[in-house]
Image (cartoon, helix red, strand yellow):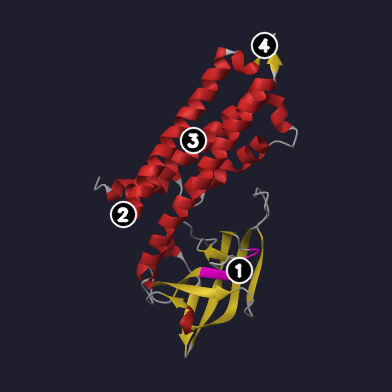
Amino acid sequence: VLAGEKKIAFAVTEPGGGSDVSAFTTTAERKGDVFVVNGGKTLISGALKADFLLTAVRTGGPGMGGLSMLLIETDRPGVSRGPVPGLQWYNRNNGWLQFDNVEVPVSNLIGVENRGFAGLASQFNIERFSGISATLAMARTCIAEAIAFARERQTFGKRLIDHQSMRHKIVEMIQRLKAAYAFLDILVWRFSRGETPVADLALLKVQATTTLEHCARESLQVLGGRAYTGDNRVERIYREARIFVIGGGSEEILRDLAAKQMGL
């Protein structure tokens, strides 16, 4: 995986539980030197191409205390997967997983049995860093597309970007993007020093995704009908922006997490 020769997916979300990890029902029953896994996951990024699944399973009782992390190879008997129909990403790599009496060696247990929540929380922090970076990169792409088009498009005898209202629209997008990047730089520095700024990371994820949605909408406004021709990156980003708000922790969950971390 580290060499880039194999792919791995983080299999957490279930049909009956997403942000509420205590509601997970996928089980891993220990029998001798194997775990027998039964259950299902859904809306898993990379599910259709993954060689390995880092999977949240229930090895103990109810609640967060009974969760464990298990590495499951996708070619094991009993593992099935498929695409999730409906509004989806263009890469079509988002899918569902089903485990039917899948035997997994006990040696594939990641961390301590029944103490997987700590590992989940740690992985969520890494996932949020990754999502934030991708989100801001897409916002930057939207702005670049808007500027390029506004410099070429002629309206009422001058370039679109020469209209004050258009310049203000673009400058506001740049302002929001720069603020989010500055926040990200601070958190990367703190993380490199061994800190785990959970509250600020949650808040930045909200800020980054709202920045993306704003930039996607405003860039679409700058491009006008051009954005609907099917050959423009802004149209695709606008379509996919909302999943970044929901995935990796919704706005509501993350704001509440930040409040709890701050002792509010």
Spatial separation of the CA atoms under disc 4 and disc 2: 51 Å
Q: Quadrant of residue 227?
A: top right
User: For numbered disc 2, what is the local secondary structure?
Assistant: loop
Q: Earlier in the sequence, mark 2 or mark 1?
A: 1
10 Å neighbourhood of mark 2: few (<14), some, or many (≥20)? few
Q: Amino acid at mark 3?
A: Thr
Question: Residue visible at 75% across and 33% down?
Answer: 229
Q: Earlier in the sequence, mark 3 or mark 4?
A: 4
Give the number of the mark in front: 2 or 1: 2
- In this picture, residue 92 sits left or right of residue 30: right
Identify the residue under disc 1.
6
Residue 138 percent across, percent down from the top left: 57, 40
- In this picture, residue 241 sits left or right of residue 22: right
Question: Residue visible at 43% across and 77% down?
Answer: 59
User: For numbered disc 1, what is the local secondary structure?
Assistant: loop
Q: Tell me, yes or no, if residue 257 can be seen here.
A: no
Give the number of the mark in front: 3 or 2: 2
* Mark 4–mark 2 CB contact (< 8 Å): no
Residue 176 percent across, percent down from the top left: 45, 31
Spatial separation of the CA atoms under disc 2 and disc 1: 30 Å
Give the number of the mark in front: 3 or 1: 1
Part of the protein shown in magenta: 48-54
* Mark 3–mark 4 CB contact (< 8 Å): no
Q: What residue occupies the far bottom of the structure in this picture?
A: 32
Q: Amino acid at mark 2?
A: Arg
Q: Quadrant of residue 44?
A: bottom right
Identify the residue under disc 4.
158
Q: Amino acid at mark 1?
A: Lys
